[in-house]
Image (spheres, rainbow, N blue to C red):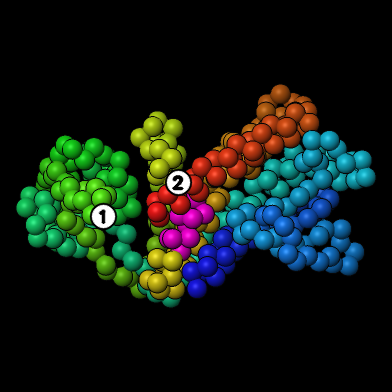
């Protein structure tokens, strides 16, 4: 079942992204060779009547693509120039490129809204649900019902914000929790987490849980979808920023094997968690693809921006060579992260 969920979750997330590109490429009249879900050897394909595009499913469910004319290093002379990507207007190319990410974001929002409507909207504000005996939070005076306002002076709005801040702070010194008591009083507690070793892994624990309150109603569901979407999106900014400045390293990233393990955990916790994981991954896929990195959608948008500034198109051959190099480096990074994920299981 984990393998089935894994294939379905990645497949749906990728399908939504590629459908965005596909729809706007077709609208622009761009020639599409193939619409593929998965990578590697082709296991099934078909063609529709009066449609040049081949629709295929490939063996490895770790990607997908819409292969459009004009993305090759050497132009395909068999395709009329007016049907190549570079011949289209700036707006048509812009919409074709951004559509994949936008579709991921819309899809994720809808899934979060469904969670709020069907299962109820979990409380996202960082209210403490319980403080555990034998841990520093309770010993210092934090209590159930306290609302965490900031960590080390940095404001937090959701429990996700709190978890992210605590992941990034130094664990060897005291951490300032500014809280609002149920009486309305503002208190600050300086807490040093307790270090524990479990299965040769070190963990730092504060001894708090967050409230499990659930709100019901359309208004609560809509608010949950907006706030949770914004929280996940913001966490991506924080992660990328800390990867750049060195606070986080490659060991903090997960590849396909790591995602497989997360899928298994989510599936065992119930279908609601599977829906949430799809929404989470969909936001991640959209966000990562927006980064201005060659081979990503953001890399192509970067060249469009250069074109807009300089008033003329970048040489398609040069651009496609740069994207090809970026794709090679991306695949190399994926291999490194996959090896890292496998080593964690051994």
Q: Is residue 27 visible?
A: no
For marks 1 and 2, give the CA distance.
18 Å
Q: Which residue occupies the foreground of this view, 41 or 262?
A: 41
* Label 1: which secondary element: loop
* Label 2: which secondary element: helix
Q: Residue at x 65, y 51 (%)?
A: 99
Q: Which residue occupies the foreground of this view, 141 or 245?
A: 245
Residue 119 lies left or right of residue 110; in this view the side is left
- First of labels 1, 2 by sequence position: 1
Q: Residue at x 78, y 28 (%)?
A: 315
Q: Is residue 200 above or below residue 315?
A: below
State the residue position of label 2. 340
Residue 130 lies left or right of residue 304; in this view the side is left
Residue 186 percent across, percent down from the top left: 13, 48
Q: Which residues are magenta?
A: 254-263
Q: Which residue occupies the foreground of this view, 56 or 306?
A: 56
Task: Give the crowd class for mark 2: few <14, some 14-19, many >=20 residues within 10 Å.
Answer: some
For the stretch drawn in magenta, what is the main secondary structure?
Answer: helix
Residue 13 percent across, percent down from the top left: 58, 60
Please identify the quadrant where the C terminus is shown: bottom left
In reply to whether residue 60 is colored magenta, the answer given is no
Q: Residue at x 21, y 51 (%)?
A: 197
């Amino acid at each position: 079942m984990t393998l089935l969920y894994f294939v379905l979750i990645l497949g749906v997330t990728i399908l939504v992204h590629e459908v965005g590109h596909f729809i706007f490429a077709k609208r622009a009249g761009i020639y599409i060779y193939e619409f593929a879900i998965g990578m590697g050897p082709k296991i099934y394909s078909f063609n529709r009547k009066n449609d040049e595009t081949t629709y295929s499913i490939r063996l490895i469910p770790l990607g997908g693509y819409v292969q459009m004319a004009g993305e090759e290093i050497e132009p395909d002379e068999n395709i009329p120039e007016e049907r190549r990507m570079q011949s289209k207007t700036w707006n048509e190319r812009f919409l074709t490129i951004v559509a994949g990410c936008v579709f991921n974001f819309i899809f994720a929002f809808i899934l979060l809204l469904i969670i709020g409507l069907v299962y109820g909207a979990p409380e996202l504000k960082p209210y403490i649900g319980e403080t555990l005996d034998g841990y520093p939070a309770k010993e210092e005076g934090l209590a159930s019902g306290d609302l965490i306002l900031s960590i080390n002076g940095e404001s937090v709005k959701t429990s996700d914000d709190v978890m992210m801040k605590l992941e990034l702070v130094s664990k060897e010194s005291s951490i300032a929790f500014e809280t609002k008591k149920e009486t309305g009083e503002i208190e600050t507690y300086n807490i040093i987490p307790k270090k524990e070793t479990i299965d040769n892994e070190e963990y730092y624990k504060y001894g708090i849980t967050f409230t499990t309150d659930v709100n019901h109603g359309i208004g609560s569901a809509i608010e949950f979808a907006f706030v949770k979407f914004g929280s996940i999106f913001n966490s991506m900014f924080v992660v990328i920023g800390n990867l750049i400045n060195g606070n986080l390293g490659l060991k903090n990233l997960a590849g396909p094997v790591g995602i497989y393990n997360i899928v298994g955990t989510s599936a065992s916790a119930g279908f609601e968690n599977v829906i949430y994981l799809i929404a989470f991954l969909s936001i991640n896929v959209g966000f990562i693809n927006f980064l201005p990195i060659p081979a990503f959608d953001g890399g192509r948008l970067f060249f469009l921006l250069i074109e807009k500034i300089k008033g003329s198109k970048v040489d398609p051959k040069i651009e496609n060579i740069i994207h090809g190099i970026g794709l090679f480096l991306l695949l190399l990074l994926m291999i490194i992260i996959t090896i890292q994920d496998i080593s964690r299981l051994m």
